[in-house]
Amino acid sequence: MNANPFTRTALVAVAMIAVGVALSSGESVRPDAPLTAPDSAREYIVHWPTGSASALADMDGVRVLSTPGSDELAKLGAFVVRVEDGATIDAILAAGAEYVEPNATLTSQDFGPTAADPLIGEQWYHAVVGSAAAWRVAKGAGVRVAVVDSGVGPHPDLSVVGGHDFTGGDGQWTDVAGHGTHVAGICCARGDNGIGGSGIAPRADVLSARVLGADGMGTIDGIAAGIIWSADQGARVINLSVGGPTGSRALQEALAYAAERGALPVCAAGNDSSTRPGYPASYADCLSVGASGKNDVLAVFSNRHASVDITAPGMTIFSTCRGGGSASWTGPAWRPPSSAGLRPWWRRSAPSPRRPCRGGCGLPPPCGPLCRAGGVLT
């Protein structure tokens, strides 16, 4: 085991939140999701091998749309189009498109707020993940964590260093629903400042990629663009407390783009008590996180698919609220930021994104289940 006490603290903290993990099947890449679309779908994402939309724009019945994330999607060679009457998906594929998929909608994943006092004593999960021991070594200073959500802030307990709106709304990156601010505070609320509670990485900075509207819903093109933008802005961790049952090649490619640039996407596994895969959490470039409660046991609503990597606290989670103040919410959206908060200070002593398991990490259970096929601790 690495003698660095900081590394050991990080591994112990991750082990403490890793109850109820379902191991992967042993395949190095998780299977792609089916690329199906409802008959009523009219807006699609098209991957064009040449990386140019000019040939698409010349096709009858195909209109290339300008969206808030067009520049980011173009880095993947992907474009959002509207298919009018007379045009067909088969015709676009026959003309040379690599894939065509519906620009589907994903949603935030939570069960709403309950009242609570703005005190760190309300944050029971710090004891579960071992935050105090980690803070004696590092608090995430200099690390950027991207929150790809409904926006972030304003809030006096958060350090937001930049943002972008990918919803086509008012062009601001501040929060329109409250969800993103609550997520950001779990990970990155400032500590030792007399305001509310503390994030798990209380010196990390936040990037706000607004991809969800006030209804908590957002399209795949905006979410993919938010991931790409976050990676380009230097995010080391990208929190995705969003999801749905349908996969997307564009989303998968955006995650790979981020991973290639050194970012770790951390994704909610889903809240359907299901063994079916959810997306984007089921893609290999995501750290897929299930939910546990105060007793450190898998939450009844948490999904249990084989792609789930770890679990983290996800019930009655106290954090920041849009416009100021704090409250407790319950839902699967809250365990990715608690895991994301561990990652910034883990990176300080472990530059590689993956660490050898060394026989179950050299620690007692439940650390062993964290080790995925191939002998790495994710």
Image: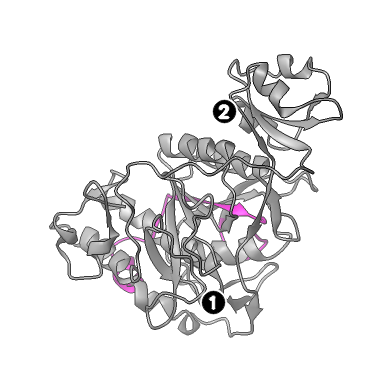
Q: Residues within 10 Å of mark 1 (few under 14, many from 20)?
A: many
Counting from the top left corner in percent of width and height, residue 286 is at 44, 49
Residue 208 in percent (x, y) is at 61, 51
Please state the extent of the stretch shown in magenta in the rendering.
130-159
* Residue 374: x %, y % from top left: 23, 46
What's the mark number on residue 371?
Answer: none
Contact between marks 2 and 1 (CB within 8 A): the answer is no
Q: Which residue is pictured at 19% across the width and 62% down the height?
A: 5
In this figure, which colouring scheme has been used for the structure?
A: one colour
Q: Secondary structure at mark 2?
A: loop
Helix, strand, or loop for circle 1? strand
Alpha-carbon distance for marks 2 and 1? 37 Å
The residue under the point 52% across, 44% down is: 33
Q: Is residue 268 left or right of residue 246?
A: left
Q: Which residue is mark 1?
A: 318
Residue 319, quarter of the rendered image: bottom right
Seen in the picture, residue 225 relative to 66 is either above or below; the reply is: below
Can residue 173 be seen in the rendering of this structure?
no
**Depth check, front residue: 102 or 296:** 102
Tell me if residue 7 can be seen: yes
The residue pinned by badge 2 equals: 76
What's the residue type where badge 2 is placed?
Leu
Q: In terms of secondary structure, what is the magenta stretch mainly? A: loop
Pick whichever of labels 2 and 1 is earlier in the sequence.
2
Name above or below for residue 54 compared with residue 373. above
Q: Residue at point 35% right, 65% down?
A: 21
Of 139 and 145, the residue lying toward us: 145
Snapshot quadrant of residue 157 = bottom right
55 within the magenta span: no
Q: Is residue 148 left or right of residue 126?
A: right
Q: Classify 55 as above or below 363.
A: above
